[in-house]
Each structure stands twice: as structure tokens, then as C-alpha cells.
Amino acid sequence: MKSSNQAYLYALAAILLWSTVATAFKLALSHFTPLQLVFVAVSTSIVALGVILAATGKLHLIKRQFASRPWFYLQTGLLNPFLYYLVLFKAYALLPAQQALSLNYTWAILLPLLAVPLLKQKLRKSDLTAALVAYLGVFVIATNGEVASVRFESATGVLLALTSTLLWSLYWIVNTKDEGDPVVSLLLSFLVGLPFILVTLLLTQSLPSWDLKALGAGIYVGLFEMGVTFVLWLVALKKADRTASMSTLVFITPVLSVGFIAWILQETITPSTFIGLGLILTALALQQLLPQLKRLRTKTAPALTPEN
């Protein structure tokens, strides 16, 4: 099989698995508190990533990468998994899955905006246009379509979902300075973050129960939100002829996710979710397409000469 075809298979497998995790979050949160779920999922992901690194002969890189930049991994471990997943799971506990999913998807809109002050990147008109469209979608979803009355079903849940996008964007901005193996870096972030999760859990709550159904849901989240799926996506990007062709496939994820939410959780998908998610996906498309159209116009525009 050609490498490019393998890339699409890996990418589609990753997208299919990521599409199920919003449903898995809600199922797991019916058994665990958000903090307990973070503990179970992160512990699972550490084991899974460790096995993957052992199978690929990269375990020896863990000590080397951490010793070279311990402060860096302290930052990434606090952001992800500790703060990000704690805030995200709390948002899912307070909101319908369809709302939390849609609001969390705006991180890709926020990321280039934060890159302007933090990475000194230039602000593009396309990013501003995308942000306006996306956050209009956020407003429609957050008010459950009652835009005129500005009435929120759970203002705290909405705030937490939007805060999760800030934390995730900050994590990726910090990661732009990472020069190590990405799977090793993810494992190190989880290894550093786990003690913070465990200490917070012991001080404020109790360890999760050993109910098999509950653990199964938590383990699923750890494997297919945090661990294995991330590796599948990295392999897809490595094998792809063009990274851009892979990134466009991500647009399938929220659509499939809403389908799983309706099918498994039996949530009635509201018109406001369809409208808001449509606006967010439109914003993501504009963010990618507008710069390409601008470059295309620049290439095809006739050169200015004294004659014209």
C-alpha cells in the first residue's frame, strides 16, 4: 500500500476514535468526578504510551529528554493533562455533550490569536474573520438559541468549556519550543502531571471506585482521547504527502461526534447546536481557505507596469 494511502487510513482511524470520546466523557462522568476521571485516564495513557515507546525502542529517550528540559515539562504537565482535562471534564459534567464538544472546538480559532502576542506572529484578517464567525456560533450554542434574551443554560459550564480552549491553545504554544520526540514529550507531560492530579485528588476527594464498568469507561478515555489516538495521528502526518490534506479531515470529527452523542447518549440535538457548530466549522474553513485564496490571487494578478 502506498504511503499516502496508509496516511489516510491512520488519519481516519484517529478521527473515528476521537469522534467517540465526547460520548465516552459523559458515560465515564456518570461514574466518576471530573478529577477522578482525569486520574484514571492519565494513568491509562501513561501505560499505553510506555508500551508504545518500548515497542519502538524509544524508552531510553525519556530520561534524556526530561534531563535536558525539566522546567519545560513542568509547564506542559501542568497545562496538559492536569489543568486542561480537569477543566474540560468539569465542563462536560455541567453541559450537554453537544454543547461542550462544540465550544471546545473553538481552540483552533483561539490559537492563532494567542500566537500574536505570545509568539510575535502577525495577525491575519482571516483569523479575525474566523474568530468573529466562530464566537457568533459560540454565542448561539451558549444561549441555546435564545440570543435575544442572552440566557445561559449553565454559565459556569460555558466559561469552563471556553477556558479549556485557552489552556489547550497555551499548551500547543508552549509545545512550539519542543525539539524532542513528540510521543516521549507527551508521556513526560503526563508523568509530570500525574503527581499533581493524585495529590489534589487525595486532598479534596477519594480515589475512584474499582467498579469494572466505571473503570472501563475511564480506560477508554485514556486510550483513545489521550494516548493511542495521538500516536495514530502522528503516524498519519508522517506518512502524508501533504499535511494540509490531513488537517482538513479533522472537520469530520465534530460531525461524527454529534452523531454518536445522539445515538448512544440519546441527546436530542437542538437546532442551536446545528447552527452554532455550523458557524464554528465555517470559521475553521475560512481560517484555512482565506490565506490560500489570497496567495492564489497574488500569484495570478498581472504585474503592474507603466503600460497598465
Image (cartoon, helix red, strand yellow):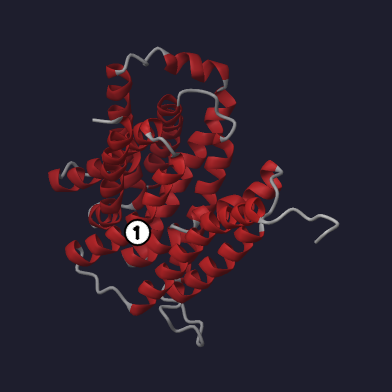
**Looking at the picture, does residue 194 appear above or below residue 35?**
above
Q: Residue furthest right?
A: 306
Any part of residue 206 in sight: no
Residue 291 in picture, x, y percent from top left = 59, 54
What residue is at 57 percent from the left and 29 percent from the top?
72
Give percent across and percent down for residue 63: 46, 15
In percent of width and height, residue 122 lies at 70, 49
User: Quick one: which residue is furthest to the bottom in this view?
Assistant: 148
Of residues 62 and 83, which is closer to you in this image? 62
Residue 75 sits in which quadrant?
A: top right
Q: Let me know if residue 241 appears in the view.
A: yes
Q: Is residue 32 left or right of residue 237?
A: left
Task: Give me the residue at 57% from left, 35% from top.
Answer: 176
Which element is circle 1 on? helix
Amino acid found under the numbered disc labelled 1? Pro
Residue at 42%, 81% in the rendered image:
145
Q: Is residue 79 left or right of residue 59?
A: right
Residue 167 position in % (x across, y down): 52, 48
